[in-house]
Amino acid sequence: MSKDPIDSSASSISKKHQESSLPTDSKARTSKSHFSKQYSGESPRVLFSSTTEIDSRKNIMAFVRECGGKSVKRMTSASMLCVGSNQPLKKSANLVLAGCMGLDIVTDKWLAETQRKGFFLDAHHYLPKDAQRERQWGFKLFEAVARGKLRGGMTGLLGGIDVYSTHGLKSLLAHSFRDFTAVATCLGADAVKNGLPNRKELGKEFLILGTADDPQTLQASHMGLEVWSKDLLVMGALRGTIQRVDEFNFASKAHEARKRHV
């Protein structure tokens, strides 16, 4: 895979699915222990973000292999995501999926210092920090990762719900679509389907994700169904709660489009 560039209506999400409890254990925050603490667990399988070029340094990658680690191309095969140091956070499918899966997320400083020490260092000390973006998006990355590490992860967010992606959304996401559907599955969706639900499927709890100018968004509006931006899922994964607010709802835009076509 190339590197990176979710009422009372039938489509509503019941309250039991709207929140995933935050970790209360104080250990969810990174420890203040010495930075020379060794990495624990299996040898890391690292996916490198587009915000770092450290994977192009042959000496670094040779060291990773010598220590039993390896580079992978898909997030679902990884145990760790490595992003660039001092780079702004991106709401990439890889970052969101890594958080959902409770995988370690580190800056490339982790690898540089790991090589200097001669062994894999504790990953917790190298979690990327971007206070401005985290404040803007209303989440804390360390909490998102901690939720993903809990037993059961965040499967309660979409448990019992089918997620539908319109054709326009699939086209927009392109190579990231497979990872986007993996996010929905990681959040507990019963199924991830393309298009709109048929009449028989309207009796089951579901969620439709699309784009503002998608013909299927307009079609859903004619059917009286709500369509949401993909950011409902993305921000739900990062915040640990599905927030059905106007920020993510295409109802008003679809209504305007319908009036233009009358």
Image (cartoon, rainbow, N blue to C red):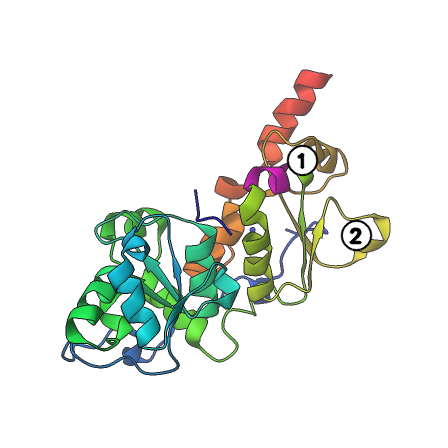
Q: Residues within 10 Å of mark 1 (few under 14, many from 20)?
A: many
Residue type at numbered disc 1: Thr
Q: Position of residue 11 (x, y in %)?
A: 69, 51
Q: Position of residue 71 (x, y in %)?
A: 40, 64
Q: Residues within 10 Å of mark 2 (few under 14, many from 20)?
A: few
Q: Secondary structure at mark 1?
A: helix
- Please tell me whether the stretch drawn in magenta is mainly helix, strand or loop: helix
Residue type at numbered disc 2: Leu
Name the mark on residue 202: 2
Q: Which residue is mark 1?
A: 217
Q: Is residue 70 magenta?
A: no
Q: Nearer the viewer, residue 65 or 172?
A: 65
Residue at 31% in and 70% down: 64
Decide: is 255 above or below 120: above
Query: Can residue 22 be spotted in the picture?
Result: no
| Left or right, residue 61 beside residue 164 | left
Q: Quadrant of residue 142?
A: bottom left
